[in-house]
Image (spheres, helix red, strand yellow):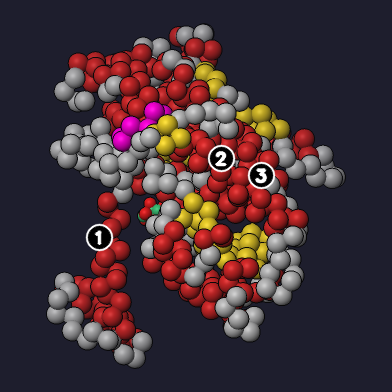
Amino acid sequence: MTATPEWAALVTHHDAVAPLHLRELFADDPGRVEALTATGADLTLDHSKHRITRETLPLLVALARRARLPERIEAMFRGDHINTSEDRAVLHTALRLPRDATLVVDGQDVVADVHAVLDRMGEFSDRVRSGEWTGHTGQRIRTVVNIGIGGSDLGPVMAYEALRAYSDRELTFRFVSNIDPADLAETLRDLDPATTLFIVASKTFTTLETLTNARNARQWLLDGLGGDQKAVAKHFVAVSTNAEKVRGFGIDEANMFGFWDWVGGRYSLPSAIGLSVMVAIGKERFREMLDGMHAMDVHFRTTPLERNLPVIAGLLGIWYDDFFGAETHAVLPYAQYLHRLPAYLQQLTMESNGKSVREDGTPVATDTGEIYWGEPGTNGQHAFYQLLHQGTRLVPCDFIGFAEPIDVLPGEGDADMHDLFAANLFAQTAALAFGKTAAEISAEGTPSHLVPHKVMPGNRPSSTILAPKLTPSTFGQIIAFYEHVTFVEGTIWGIDSFDQWGVELGKVLAQQLVPVLSGDEPDVSGLDASTAALVRRYRQLRGR
Ligand code: F6P
């Protein structure tokens, strides 16, 4: 892409735009906000506070066309094998198609398959929620523990937290992911095996962390219920693409919810991997989430690139990453319920686009993979916003806000509290964009030696994504929005956003090290000098 005329045009354009301040850009163009605000489904994306002129997006869109983005979008939705290194279709969008849609891929009607699993999930969720599904001793389930990691954990836990206001408060939900024994121990310490249900979520059902936690959970259950193996069927269900391994673990296939190799782990929330979320909020609200995702899918597939929310946001990511040299991208939800969104987006974007070779194996010519990070407002304001406002780095930010509150508290009046919250969001984006000049600060009578400390340079870019209210539907729209942003960026970079070969080596090495750490394999001579020394020290500290 860097050798194309479209890229060259953007380099020239960047030279012209980089010196401009957002103060000037707003002053010079009264119609700017209207021109640089787009809507899709229930979301509004204000991108006027970006370091762009009205020429920038058309130039970026020309680059997207050069990268054949429209054709790639169609190829993804159609089910072409665009995950080339694994030779797989990429069809998370099929997971949220309505029941009456049809999509035949590799000779199979995937919509029928998807809805068959959704129906089974719905029946199961109803039984757990109503108390009809009982444990081994006949008691109803009170706690659901999802055991998974990566996409089999981050999606469910993030979505559960996001939508917990809609959840059945009679049930408790917990999520175990880390192979650190502390995670499982802390999760189980106050639970009653008789009323606990485990969902073992693993696409491959071979993941060390998940299977180790699941085996330990099964032992805890059997110890607590007198050792009767029949208890497992009442307290363990599985979500996986690998029926054989599930059977091998001892979970009845009747208690397994399947999905398909065309669902990537980090895109699997709308598949059976979302089972814990469905049990929490019920099948109808889960459907609302899927419908919200579908609404964003339709927007992405059918809206002209210039007004297409994920396209605009993805191209802005390219603009800052590759032309301004930005290193990171902050995501700042003004919703406490979205407190796990940044962690979820880290896997979505960084496992997808953290690649240094293109699809054909040749090295990329630019930086790829934005580094996502963030915390909910207003907590972040009292932690790292100082750097955003006055630091030396350029950090493009996404502010996510909602007009209506979910929770209404007695006393002060919740509308006021929510207004205060939203006021902080709008104030931050304005302060970042426009700052405060030395002249303005001096005019307030500030002593001259303090003026440089108080100058707010401004010109710090942000998007504001505004939705009416955090509901399953708008939540689904936001998740699908970021999935497609990731796809747009990967397409421009020419990489395979759907494989993750880079996580394999560490897994293999860890397996090799286990007998060395335990002392079963005393010889450390095959290890590099640093690792060998650390292993020796570790063994010494553990008395081995
Ligand atoms: O860490 C790599 C990875 O394969 C992720 O892509 C995936 O979400 C996670 O491991 C868990 O995998 P599984 O669902 O197969 O247990």
x then y, percent, for residue 258: 49, 51
- The answer to whether residue 463 shows anywhere in this view is no
x then y, percent, for residue 276: 60, 54
Circle nearer the viewer, 1 or 3: 3
State which region is magenta.
77-82
**Residue at image coords 46%, 37%:** 110
* Residue that carries the numbered disc 2 in the rendered image: 115
**Residue at image coords 72%, 40%:** 406
Going from N to C along the chain, the mark reached first, 1 or 2, is 2
Give the residue type that dot 2 points to.
Answer: His
- The answer to whether residue 62 shows anywhere in this view is yes
Residue 505: assigned label: 1
Residue 518: assigned label: none
* Residue that carries the numbered disc 3 in the rendered image: 283
Compared across the picture, whether 402 is left or right of 465 comes to right
* 389, 105: nearer the viewer: 105
Residue most toward the right?
Answer: 411
Q: Disc 2, ligand 1: is the CB inside 8 Å?
A: no
x then y, percent, for residue 97: 53, 32
Q: How far is mark 1 from mark 3, CA to CA?
A: 39 Å
Give the residue type that dot 3 points to.
Answer: Lys
Ligand 1 - quadrant of the structure image:
bottom left
Circle nearer the viewer, 1 or 2: 2
Going from N to C along the chain, the mark reached first, 3 or 2, is 2
Going from N to C along the chain, the mark reached first, 1 or 3, is 3
Give the residue type that dot 1 points to.
Answer: Leu
Tell me the crowding category of disc 3: few under 14, some 14 to 19, or many 20 or more residues within 10 angstroms, Cα based.
many
Which secondary structure dominates the residues rendered in magenta? loop
**Residue at image coords 49%, 29%:** 102
* 210, 458: nearer the viewer: 210
Circle nearer the viewer, 3 or 2: 2
x then y, percent, for residue 430: 54, 27
